[in-house]
Image (tube, grey):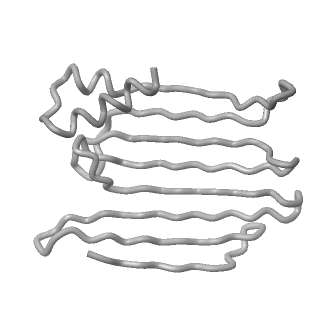
Amino acid sequence: MCQHNFIHLFTCVYHFPDEDDYRRLTFDDNLVTISDTGKELGEFHVSVRRTRHEEKDCFLIHANSHGTIDNVPCGTSVLAYVTPHLETLEQQHHEYVKVLKENAISSVIIMYMYAGSSGTSFISLSWLFNNNNTLHYSSNACK
């Protein structure tokens, strides 16, 4: 099911989608990662929904995974607002690794796209945390 919806999403880029196209593009899917011995290692979830973001029709795509690698809990979450023509309006990316219970490392990246009279601009904000204390912050802007 998941593969079919992604293929359909990419074919809609080449023509203006109609209501039937939109309906087929929205979905939820879950996967479980299992080791060779049958032990559950983690989970993956993805969903695509129609929404509006800053007055624009778009899709809200949310994908997250979490699990354990070598007994270390870790995970990733991506939240994106994407136009029907696959232009990213905003994207948030969060990753974490819990090396020790009292010493977790987390990274957050947020990207915004702005279309104005002078063209399209991108702004990226990035934080790195250790136990909720900011270790590093950066920002970038480009056209």
Relative to residue 83, is residue 41 depicted above or below?
above
Q: Nearer the viewer, residue 89 or 13?
A: 13
The part of the image, by quadrant, that contains residue 101 is: bottom right
**Residue placed at 41% from the left, 33% from the top?**
48
Residue 35 in the image: x percent, y percent? 80, 31
The image quadrant that residue 12 belongs to is top left
Residue 98 placement: quadrant = bottom right
Name the foreground residue: 122 vs 102.
122
Residue 39: horizontal and vertical position, in percent? 84, 28
Above or below, comparing residue 22 to residue 112 in the picture:
above
Q: Residue furthest front?
A: 36
Up-down relation of residue 129 to residue 88 (above or below): below
Quadrant of the snapshot with the N terminus: top left
Lateral position of residue 84 relative to residue 66, left or right:
left
Residue 56 horizontal side relative to residue 50, left or right:
left
Percent from the top left, x then y, of residue 58?
A: 28, 42
User: Which residue appears at 74% of the width and 65% of the height?
Assistant: 105
Residue at the (42%, 56%) spot, across then down? 91
Q: Position of residue 68 (x, y in %)?
A: 80, 44
